Amino acid sequence: MAEPRKPDIKKSILNRVRMLYILFFAVGVAIAGKILYIQYGPGGESLRSKGERISYERVAIEADRGDVLAWDGRLLATSVPMYEVRMDFAAQGLADSVFRKYADSLAGALATFFGDKSKNAYLILLNRAYSNKSKNRFTQIAPRRVNHLEIKQISRFPILRLGQNRGGFIPVQINKRLLPNGPMASRTIGRVNEAGRKWGVEGAFDSVLRGTDGNMLMQRISGSFKIPVPDALSVAPVDGIDVVTTLDIDVQDVAENALRKQLELGDADWGTAVLMEVSTGEIRAITNLTRKGEGKFVEDFNYAVGMNLEPGSTFKLASLMTLLDDAGASLEEHYDTGDGRMMIGRARVVDSHACGDVTLREVFEHSSNVGFALAVNKYYKENPRRFVDHLYKMGLGMPLDLQIPGGADPVIFRPGDASWSGVTLTMMSYGYALRLTPLKTLSFYNAVANDGKMVRPMFVKELKQYGQTLRTFPPEVMVPSIGSPKVIAQVQEALRGVVNDGTARGLKNPYYSVAGKTGTAQIAMGRHGYTDRFGGRHYLATLVGYFPADKPRYSCIVAIKTYNGPGRRGTYYGASLAGPVFRAIADRVYARNTSWQTPLSERSDKTDGVPALKSGRADEVRRVARRFDVPYTPERGVQWQCLAKADSTGMELAPLSGEPSGAVPQVVGMGIKEAIYLLEREGLRVAFSGTGCVRSQSIPAGAPAQRGALVVLQLGAGRPEVRPRAVKSDASAGPER
């Protein structure tokens, strides 16, 4: 019987292999066909473009914004990198075992670093995000943005130290605008916010500061990880240009601190101060502070540039120039102002104090509303248009057209306008029925200091890039001459008289000369006139001028707005409220300019005579007199003494009352310690500025001491002239103080 044939195992295996080859070949052909169909079929073009979009992306590269610099190159605004701390919980390399093991440690590190919530709160946040990681590819895990040093520290936290792919760590850089000097001059430096609103230097020069953004082609490798790809179309960013302003940080700091202090002392609503270089119009300092709650002041509005108000007595310089230059009036002609209350036409005009029969020069020095109303009506009653035309001729109606936005234009009505009435000319003569910004007023006084040439105020002097100057901004002349040389010289002398003998005597000092003008204007309250519905009044206290008076280098204006409600008797006069700020700024500028200062060996104020003694407690006065061998006439049995007479033979002291009298005491000539004691004993509040003995007091000696009223003392060196006088205070005495 024949043996059965054995199956050919080798042949069987080969057949099976052939079948597999055929199957794989068929599958490969099918796959290739499907790929070709997808690539080049009906929807192939859209799918190819979608694939390119997913794999490649053109990313914008933000240009570095230029810096805003002070006049000497110090930073006022710059951009610094800040980082958002984000995490990709679906990163391909982030293993589940790694997250479960180290999530607790990461939560503890975040809680310790930021301190805003507990470790358990952070752990809950991380676990929730990881439990639905497909939707949490870009989750912010930090409560705030961090700086470069902080992001370096955070990059060493558990899990995050593994990097972007294995740890999901995504630091997102965002450039933040930083003011190295805090809020100093922040309104003038300005900003461009996320909504696109612009203000200040940043807004005006945004086109050059922001530079030009670039772009780069990036390829997505895995998850959110991308790498740059060489591409001929990539564009490198062009950094922004630096803007060099005219601001002086040192003077700006003094101006801001002095203004804040005075706003606090006077319980004022807001204030502004500006320092300008006479010859160029460059703004060296500008501060604008608004009260926001008790003891808090912020820069939220540029009052110097954008607040149009009736200027009050500071406008009398324009009236005086018009009278002298256009009408041919004389500083020595007389006007009888009577008791300071007079009906002129249909207008009731009131002075804060009676001046009597005075010259036009004295009308200006003592700021008489009645005097200016009489003078302007004398020459312009029949032709008021001529008066207004001359105001425009001097540039007072000309917009400043500043380098920064937000400036308000002057409002000066003409005869025939809807707002012109029978009292407009009279009110205009002493600074009402028209509106000017503080900076516009300063530019006019600056023109007087500049021998008649009105220059446009400047905030930016040049543009720089990489230390090289690209463009400079020269001074711009607005009006070549606001008056004849003769008239300019006359009003310059009149402005010196205001400081030497008039309402701004608090600025007088032995070191440098000042010329200026005070103003205390009431602010109109709409249909209620100059009194609100509660009977309160709003005041604008202003002091504007320039220094040194003989060779003007800088002009300055300080304006402070206060409110005196019913029963409140705070200070609101330009001399006492705005004067200390003006003096603080001028003192700082003088101290820095050694070329102005006379060497001690050449000082003319040296003396071999009897040194001055401060008034005060009698026993202390006697002790000092004996110690320095100062001859004096003693007065026995008194507790307080004041200086009555001083000459080469010695000093004569007069007794002061040792008990409260209900009247403001005479503290001129005293040290600040004794002055504060005597004033507070009468229930008065005290504010002071300067050093040395008391040179002047805002409420004269002998006036009724109203409890809570503020007395502002101006201190200074040398022997003061004691001139006690009592003046009746009248808060309802009309629109001007």
Image: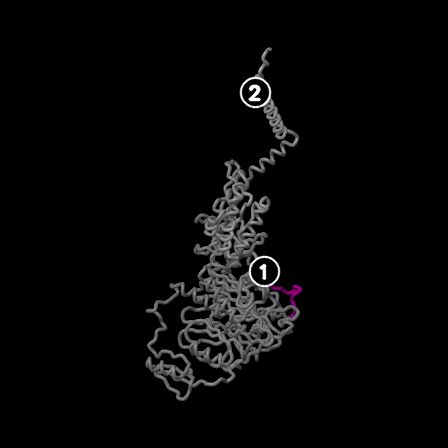
Question: Up-down: is 712 above or below 594?
Answer: below
Q: How packed is label 1: few (under 14 Cα within 10 Å), some, or many (20 or more)?
A: many
Q: Position of residue 518 (x, y in %)?
A: 52, 70
* Residue 418 location (% of width, % of height): 67, 64
Q: Is residue 307 above or below residue 360?
A: above
Q: Amino acid at mark 2?
A: Ile
The local crowd at label 2, few if under 14, some if 14 to 19, many if 20 or more residues have their Cα within 10 Å, is few
State how far apart marks 1 and 2 are (Cα): 101 Å
How many numbered callouts? 2
From the image, which quarter does the N terminus lie in? top right
Note whether residue 476 is visible.
no
Give the amino acid at mark 1: Asp
Q: Which residues are magenta?
A: 407-422
Q: Earlier in the sequence, mark 1 or mark 2?
A: 2
Question: Is residue 606 among what the camera can see?
Answer: yes
Q: Nearer the viewer, residue 486 or 195?
A: 195
Task: Work out which quarter of the rendered image holds the C terminus and state it.
Answer: bottom right
**Is 89 contained in the magenta span?**
no
Name the residue carrying label 1.
409
Mark linked to residue 357: none
* Percent x, y of residue 642: 42, 82
Q: Secondary structure at mark 1?
A: loop
489 left or right of 391 in image? left
Q: Determine the residue positioned at 45% across, 85% down.
A: 658
According to the image, label 2 marks what residue?
13
Q: Is residue 395 shown above or below 615?
A: above
Using the image as rendered, state which of residue 370 and residue 670 is in the foreground.
670
Q: Position of residue 492 (x, y in %)?
A: 48, 68
Dominant SS in magenta:
loop
